[in-house]
């Protein structure tokens, strides 16, 4: 999954107005981000990739870029 694919997945699944520049932003700066978005994102990524996502590790991440990197490492 490319970064562009990932941001499209986030935008489509979570219905958030995000762009590629939002990948590196801290969650405090991402529009309307909350813990339910994380749960929905994990489900969407697992459906898209067919792989389990290490949710416990993702909880410590503070940006979509960090989540993308973890997901890419697990692939």
Image (tube, rainbow, N blue to C red):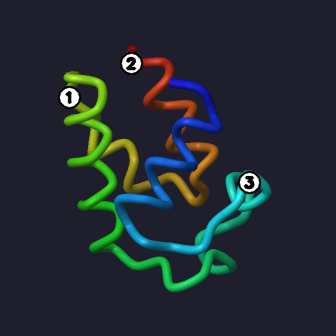
Question: Mark 1 or 2 closer to N-term?
Answer: 1
- Taking the spot 21% from the left edge, 48% from the top edge, the residue there is 43
**Horizontal side of residue 23 vs 12, given as left or right:** right
- The spot of residue 25 in percent (x, y) is 73, 63
- The spot of residue 53 in percent (x, y) is 27, 34
How far is the residue under mark 1 from the one under mark 2? 8 Å
Q: Is residue 26 above or below residue 42?
A: below
- The spot of residue 32 in percent (x, y) is 51, 85
- The spot of residue 57 in percent (x, y) is 37, 42
**Horizontal side of residue 40 vs 71, given as left or right:** left
Residue furthest right as drawn: 21
Residue named by callout 1: 52
Q: Which corner quadrant holds the C terminus? A: top left
Which image quarter: residue 18? bottom right
Q: Assess disc 2: are there few (<14), some (14-19) or many (≥20) residues with their C-alpha within 10 Å of its C-alpha.
A: few
How far is the residue under mark 1 from the one under mark 3? 23 Å
Question: Mark 1 or 3 closer to N-term?
Answer: 3
Secondary structure under the numbered disc 2 in the rendered image = helix
Residue furthest bottom as drawn: 32
In the rendered structure, find residue 24 and report the number of the disc placed on it.
3
Q: Assess disc 1: are there few (<14), some (14-19) or many (≥20) residues with their C-alpha within 10 Å of its C-alpha.
A: some
Secondary structure under the numbered disc 3 in the rendered image = helix
Q: Assess disc 3: are there few (<14), some (14-19) or many (≥20) residues with their C-alpha within 10 Å of its C-alpha.
A: some
Residue named by callout 2: 74
Q: Nearer the viewer, residue 57 or 4?
A: 4
- Taking the spot 51% from the left edge, 52% from the top edge, the residue there is 61
- Taking the spot 48% from the left edge, 18% from the top edge, the residue there is 73
Q: Is residue 60 above or below residue 32?
A: above
């Amino acid at each position: 999954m490319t970064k562009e694919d990932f941001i499209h997945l986030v935008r489509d699944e979570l219905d958030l107005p995000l762009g590629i520049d939002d990948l590196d932003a801290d969650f405090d700066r991402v529009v309307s981000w909350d813990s339910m978005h994380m749960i929905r994102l994990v489900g969407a990524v697992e459906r898209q990739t067919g792989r389990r996502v290490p949710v416990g590790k993702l909880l410590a991440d503070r940006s979509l870029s960090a989540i993308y990197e973890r997901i890419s490492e697990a692939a």
